[in-house]
């Protein structure tokens, strides 16, 4: 029996689903922030990141054997790396909370986390439209939707960082929170990079 070809775009969708679950968990952790539960929460978060790694490795193993993939190998590999970085970036947020031993969460973190969840959902919707490039106009519209949320996330990041330097410029936690905000902003950037690469692939294959 002939083996069915791997569904690369289906794999990418599964990764975005994991990212959505991660970002939802991040919201839950921040809403009920408890420093004593950070290690437990990190383990729970890392389960999703590990599943994303497995999906990526499985896909690469199949790509090596695929004589004629649906799009160029280089494009598939670039997308695989970028999708994986989305899950990595969300995973790393909690790692920063743990490394800097954050005792209490700042109020402006929750809106940022909710916006991260929103951009992950937008990226999942974009990925769901990928199969076959049958509607490039719709795909490009969804790319713009991801870009728009990234812009909104950037504003939240800038406002939170400015507030930190105005209200707590002498705080010993200034460096810690600066790095945490940068980690949160990385989540937006990682999603936008996927969307931008998808746009490049659309143009290349249309």
Image (cartoon, grey):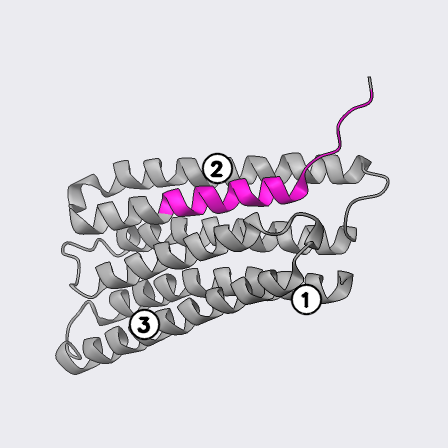
Are the residues at dot 3 and dot 2 in contact (C-beta closer than 8 Å)? no
**Residue most toward the bottom?**
166
Could you tell me which residue is drawn at 23 percent across and 46 percent down? 29
The reply to whether the magenta stretch includes residue 99 is no
Residue 159: x and y in percent read 26, 77
- For label 3, the residue is 157
Q: Nearer the viewer, residue 38 or 2?
A: 2
| Rendered position, 177 above or below 125 | below
Q: In the shown orientation, is residue 155 left or right of residue 87? A: left
The reply to whether the magenta stretch includes residue 16 is yes
**Residue most toward the right?**
67
Residue 44: x and y in percent read 33, 36
- Magenta range is 2-22
Q: Main structural element of the magenta stretch: helix, strand or loop?
A: helix
Are the residues at dot 3 and dot 1 in contact (C-beta closer than 8 Å)? no
Residue 99: x and y in percent read 30, 53
Which of marks 1 and 3 precedes in the sequence?
Answer: 3
Residue 197 in view of the camera: no
Q: Nearer the viewer, residue 126 or 41?
A: 126
Which of marks 1 and 2 precedes in the sequence?
Answer: 2
Residue 23: x and y in percent read 35, 49
Residue 185 in view of the camera: yes
User: Disc 3 versus disc 2: distance between alpha carbons?
Assistant: 27 Å
Q: Secondary structure at mark 1?
A: helix
Q: Secondary structure at mark 2?
A: helix
User: Disc 3 versus disc 1: distance between alpha carbons?
Assistant: 27 Å
Could you tell me which residue is drawn at 55 percent across and 48 percent down? 128
- For label 2, the residue is 50
Which of the image's four quarters has the C terminus? bottom right
- For label 1, the residue is 200
For label 2, count other residues whose C-alpha is less than 10 Å away and answer few (under 14), some (14-19) or many (20+).
some
| Rendered position, 91 above or below 66 | below
């Amino acid at each position: 029996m002939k083996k069915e070809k791997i569904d690369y775009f289906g794999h990418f969708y599964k990764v975005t689903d994991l990212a959505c679950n991660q970002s939802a968990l991040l919201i839950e952790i921040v809403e009920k922030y408890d420093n004593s539960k950070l290690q437990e929460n990190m383990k729970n978060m890392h389960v999703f990141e590990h599943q994303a790694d497995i999906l990526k490795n499985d896909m690469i193993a199949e790509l090596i054997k695929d004589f004629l993939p649906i799009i160029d190998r280089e494009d598939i590999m670039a997308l695989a790396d970028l999708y994986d970085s989305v899950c990595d970036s969300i995973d790393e947020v909690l790692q920063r909370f743990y490394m800097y031993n954050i005792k209490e969460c700042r109020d402006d973190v929750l809106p940022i986390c909710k916006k991260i969840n929103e951009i992950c959902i937008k990226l999942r919707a974009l990925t769901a439209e990928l199969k076959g490039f049958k509607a490039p106009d719709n795909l490009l519209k969804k790319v713009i939707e991801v870009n728009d949320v990234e812009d909104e996330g950037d504003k939240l990041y800038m406002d939170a960082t400015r507030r930190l330097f105005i209200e707590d410029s002498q705080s010993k936690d200034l460096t810690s929170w600066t790095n945490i905000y940068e980690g949160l902003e990385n989540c937006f950037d990682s999603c936008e990079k996927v969307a931008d690469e998808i746009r490049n692939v659309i143009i290349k294959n249309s």
